[in-house]
Every structure is written in structure tokens, then in C-alpha cells.
Image (spheres, rainbow, N blue to C red):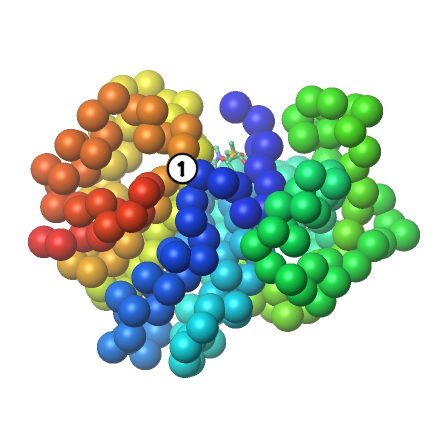
Amino acid sequence: MGTITYPFRQDLDWKRLAQFEIDNFKNKDKVNIIQFASSDGSEAYTQIISLLESQHAGNIDKFFPILAYDIDEEVTKAAKSGLINLKQKHVDLINKNSNRFSEYFQSSEKILTIENDLNIKASAQDYVKTYKVADKLTNKVIFNQADMYDILFKYRDNSNTILLCRNLLGYFDDKKIKSTLHIISEKLKKDSLFIIGGIDSDISLIELYLECKGFKEVMKHVYKKIR
Ligand SMILES: C[S@@+](CC[C@H](N)C(=O)[O-])C[C@H]1O[C@@H](n2cnc3c(N)ncnc32)[C@H](O)[C@@H]1O
């Protein structure tokens, strides 16, 4: 599977998602963003930037810190380092979604090496550069190495959860997909959100399955628990 990821992955409308999250939880004092398969932190930073830059955001502190988990030791170490590797096309993608790139990312003298990083190996000629991530992003997320199932089994939702589990289920076999979706549907209460990725939406009948489990698709790849 690998840990490949990048900021503002185009399988989600991040801006619209942030606005939806703000509206959906406008009556909640605290919202828990739980991120499984958090990889090198790209996705957490994307979510934070999107919330920070939302219009009419109100109190967005209630969304932080994001609790981000990945089973892979190397990639979690990289996320915790406060550094990130970006190719020029990733820089362009961030610039397309935010005009404050330099507020969030600064060129670093240090080089971030991640063992088995497919992003680097995929095309060595496509130059990867290491950036320091600004404190305003890193202090809004806590990265931990953990198996998502250990976290999920213990989790208690109070109808105030945003659970991102993106581009992971799609790599599992049918039995594991169904049992994972079953646990998630048992854990998440009405109004909480479950967010998947483009690779996961290739799973046959996933929408129908999630509907049967009490979820409604509120935007592409975003499901709200409605009962
Ligand atoms: C393809 S990446 C997806 C990264 C990111 N969510 C995205 O959509 O760009 C899949 C990640 O899932 C992690 N992973 C695999 N099994 C896991 C598990 N049981 N618990 C937590 N993370 C897991 C891998 O280490 C890898 O970093």
C-alpha cells in the first residue's frame, strides 16, 4: 500500500468540507477530528489550513488539536518532525487552494528522509524539497503511531466527531471492509461525519452499504450519520 499522500489531495473539496464542518457542528463546543492513515501529516495540514481560511469561521479552536494516527513508524516519525517533503506540483496545489503558502511552509536546510517513501521513489527526477511546517499548523495536530482499530475500539463519540479514514479501506479485502465499516457505524453517533477517499469509493456498493448503516452522503466522499 505504501504511505504515499500529499496536501490538498483532489479527491475532496476541502474548502466546501471546512464550511460544512463549521455549519454541521455550529451548536457544539468541542469537535473531535480523528484522522486514521494520517501518513506524513499532509492531510492534517490540509484540514487545518482549510478551517483556518474558512469564511465566517467563528470559533474554530474547538476543532483542534486533530488526533492523527498512522500504523507506520517511519511516516509517523516524519510527521512528528515538523518537516514535510513537497514536490513542485504539491507546492502548486497548495498555492491553488491557499494564497498563504509561505505562512505555512518555509524551505528548510534539513533533509527529511522517510524510508520506503514511494513519493520519492516514484519519480526520483521529480525534485523533492524539504520544508519546515509553521507552528500554527503543527500545534493544531498530535501525531501518534497506532493501529486504527486500537483507537476505534476504545472510542466514545458524543455526536461531535469527524472521522477521516481516507484511501485505506480500498486496499482491504471485502470482509475487512465490511467489519471496519460496521465498527465505524456502531461508534459514530447521529450528526458525526465519516470521510473516505477516492480509492475507497471504488469499493463496490460502499455508498449503499453506508446508507444501510445509517449514513447519508452529504458531499462527495463525506458521510453524515443521520440515525
Ligand atoms: C495510501 S496512505 C493514505 C494517506 C492519506 N490518508 C491520504 O488519503 O492521502 C495509507 C496509510 O494508511 C496507513 N495504515 C495502514 N494500515 C493502518 C492501520 N491499521 N491503522 C492506521 N494506519 C494504517 C499506512 O501506513 C499509510 O500511511
Residue 189 position within the rendered picture, expressed as x and y whole percent measured from the top left = 18, 57
Mark 1 residue CB less than 8 A from any atom of ligand 1: yes
Label 1 element class: loop
Residue 31 sits in quarter: bottom left
Question: Most extreme residue toward the top, as rendered?
Answer: 173
Relative height, residue 43 to residue 176 (above, below)? below
Q: Quadrant of residue 90?
A: top right
Residue in the picture at 25% in, 77% down: 27
Image check: 202 left or right of 189? right
Q: Give how far across and how far down residue 16 sits, in percent.
A: 39, 57
The quarter of the picture where the C terminus appears is bottom left
Q: Which residue is mark 1?
A: 197
How many numbered marks appear? Answer: 1
Is residue 94 rendered to the left or right of residue 69?
Answer: right
Q: Residue at x 35, y 69 (%)?
A: 22
Q: Position of residue 211 (x, y in %)?
A: 14, 39
Q: Is residue 126 visible?
A: yes
List the single residue furthest toward the right: 109
The three-letter code of the residue at mark 1 reads: Gly
